[in-house]
Amino acid sequence: MPKIVDHDQRRLELVDATWRIIARLGMEGATMREIAEEAGFANGALKPYFPTKDLLLTSAFGHVFNRTNQRIAAMTSGLAGIAALRAFCAEVLPLDEDRVNEARIVIPFWQKALNDPDMAALHSESMNQWHTTITAHAGAARAAGEISTPIPDAAVADHLLNMMLGAQIVAALSPDEHFSQDLSGQLENYLALLAA
Amino acid sequence: MPKIVDHDQRRLELVDATWRIIARLGMEGATMREIAEEAGFANGALKPYFPTKDLLLTSAFGHVFNRTNQRIAAMTSGLAGIAALRAFCAEVLPLDEDRVNEARIVIPFWQKALNDPDMAALHSESMNQWHTTITAHAGAARAAGEISTPIPDAAVADHLLNMMLGAQIVAALSPDEHFSQDLSGQLENYLALLAA
């Protein structure tokens, strides 16, 4: 009797192995052979799941994005206004080793997306989704009197989204340099500007 | 008599050709052959100047950074405080086609820097330099009564630097999406927060 294979499970194992290898060796070091070995697959066994490295990378990015969203949902549950905004951003900011590794996936993904319309669309879709959520939290914070700045809620979302993009580069490339405050401190300072 | 060659000039031509090709074809498309052709060099003639593509990329990034600094120096000359801060950031933000092309160099550079300590050091050095300058402009703005926020000058520099990093990604990947305001508008909104 043939062995029953859970293909979704195997795909997930491959995606996990992919981002571990990219975080460790960089995009160029992450060969299909290295990824297969990390996942405990025979070398040729990847192809049926992911015919190309680009497809694997897109899946790895999608996986990181979904996992971030699960963390956000868990951490913002029951919160509103500034508390929800703070919890949302704290989950996106690369504040621990796992999330710094995620930043190390996201940068190669952006680089690929420069010349790959599907990856660029996945990036845009993710950012649109976050912009909408952050704008809503900012609106609730304003309604509760927690935000008194004259700039619109969507402009607050612009700033936070942009800062969260920049934070991936800071965390991946120079976590301990050229900033007077760590990323949490930067977030708190921004929230202080909104309250002023 | 042998032809007299201005080696610095030729190096500059190669660096210019490199960033045009990366902007157009992406990192993977930017082969040494393509770059030589763009610069009007015979295929083998690059090697004496830049033995590897990584060295060319590092030089191209350094060149973009120097050129940006020249523009900043020209545009902030004679300005102080918020006016200097605004002019500085406006030169770094990718607000025209040339600077969007520069953003398309910077992203592959970051991706390479993830696994190249020399490139990472060049990135850090550049960011330290900007952080120092922005902090000084913020200090002058505060002294002139243009900034009244309680967050420190260096924290303002943290935000602006982080936003300028994020802006490169926005401009290169999704210039017309998921932000309610263009990058100039985002800068003006941030300056409005400082004045409040």
Image (cartoon, coloured by chain):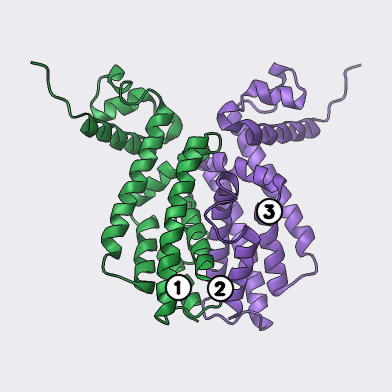
Chain colours: A green, B purple
Residue at position x 69%, y 82% from top?
A: B144
Disc 3 residue crowd, few under 14, some 14–19, many 20+, Cα 10 Å:
some
Q: Tell me the element at label 3.
A: loop
Residue at position x 50%, y 81% from top?
A: A196
> In this picture, is A68 found above or below A77?
above
User: Considering depth in this image, is A90 or B66 the residue closer to the camera?
Assistant: A90
Q: Position of residue A169 (x, y in %)?
A: 49, 50
> In this picture, is B141 found above or below A19?
below
Q: Position of residue B67 (x, y in %)?
A: 73, 48
Disc 2 residue crowd, few under 14, some 14–19, many 20+, Cα 10 Å:
some
Please give the label number shown on residue A191: 1
Q: Nearer the viewer, mark 2 or mark 3?
A: 2
Q: Amino acid at mark 3?
A: Leu
> In this picture, is B109 found above or below A67?
above
Subunit under mark 2: A
Q: Tell me the element at label 2.
A: loop
Residue at position x 29%, y 53% from top?
A: A70
Q: Nearer the viewer, mark 1 or mark 2?
A: 2
Query: Could you tell me which quadrant the N terminus of chain B lies in?
Result: top right
Q: Answer left or right for B145 relative to A74.
A: right
Whether residues under marks 1 and 3 lie with C-beta atoms below 8 angstroms apart, the answer is no
Q: CA distance from mark 2 to mark 3?
A: 21 Å
Subunit under mark 3: B
User: Considering depth in this image, is A189 or A25 the residue closer to the camera?
Assistant: A189
Q: Position of residue B3 (x, y in %)?
A: 88, 20
* Residue under pointer 3: B95
Disc 1 residue crowd, few under 14, some 14–19, many 20+, Cα 10 Å:
some
Q: Amino acid at mark 1?
A: Leu
Query: Could you tell me which quadrant the C terminus of chain B lies in?
Result: bottom right
Subunit under mark 1: A
Same subunit under labels 2 and 3? no
